[in-house]
Image (cartoon, rainbow, N blue to C red):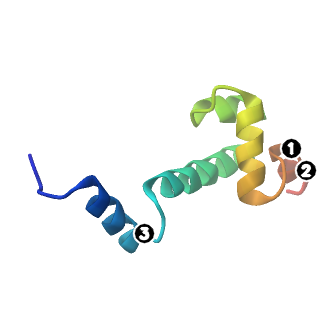
Amino acid sequence: AEVGLSLKKLKEGFRQVYGNSVYGFLFDYKMEVSRKMLESQRFNVNEVGLKIGYSTASHFIAAFKKKFGVTPKKYLQSL
């Protein structure tokens, strides 16, 4: 069904409600999920990256470091 909102207006509304872009919101959510998966110690770094949608471990590691300031391995060592 049509809602009569342009994509621009929809994105602006999303940012007002969530304080973030759709991409930023999803990125933060995926990083939180990955952090919890690592903490559970049921998955290795490669598995976590694949499960949250990264095609390579290196892309996941870079994204995790961007979000949390440490690599997933260093994060696990700090637990």
Q: On the picture, is 41 further left or further right than 25?
A: right
- Contact, mark 1 vs mark 2 (Cβ under 8 Å): yes
Question: Disc 2 designates what residue?
Answer: 77
Question: Disc 1 designates what residue?
Answer: 73
Q: Residue at x 35, y 66 (%)?
A: 12
| Residue 57 in view | yes
Label 2 secondary element: helix
- Decide which of 62, 49 is in the foreground and name it: 62
Q: CA distance from mark 3 to mark 2?
A: 32 Å
Packing grade of label 2 (10 A; few <14, some 14-19, many >=20) is: few
Residue 24 on image: x %, y %: 53, 56
Quarter of the figure with residue 49: top right
Q: CA distance from mark 1 to mark 3?
A: 30 Å
Residue 7 on image: x %, y %: 28, 53
Tell which tag, 1 or 3, sits nearer the viewer: 3
Q: Residue at x 77, y 33 (%)?
A: 58
Q: Is residue 50 above or below residue 68?
A: above
Q: How many marks?
A: 3
Amino acid on which the number 1 mark rests in the picture: Lys
Packing grade of label 3 (10 A; few <14, some 14-19, many >=20) is: few
Amino acid on which the number 2 mark rests in the picture: Gln
Label 3 secondary element: helix
Q: Residue at x 71, y 38 (%)?
A: 60
Tell which tag, 1 or 2, sits nearer the viewer: 1
- Decide which of 60, 41 is in the foreground and name it: 60
Label 1 secondary element: helix
Packing grade of label 1 (10 A; few <14, some 14-19, many >=20) is: few
Tell which tag, 3 or 2, sits nearer the viewer: 3
Q: CA distance from mark 1 to mark 2?
A: 6 Å
Question: Disc 3 designates what residue?
Answer: 18
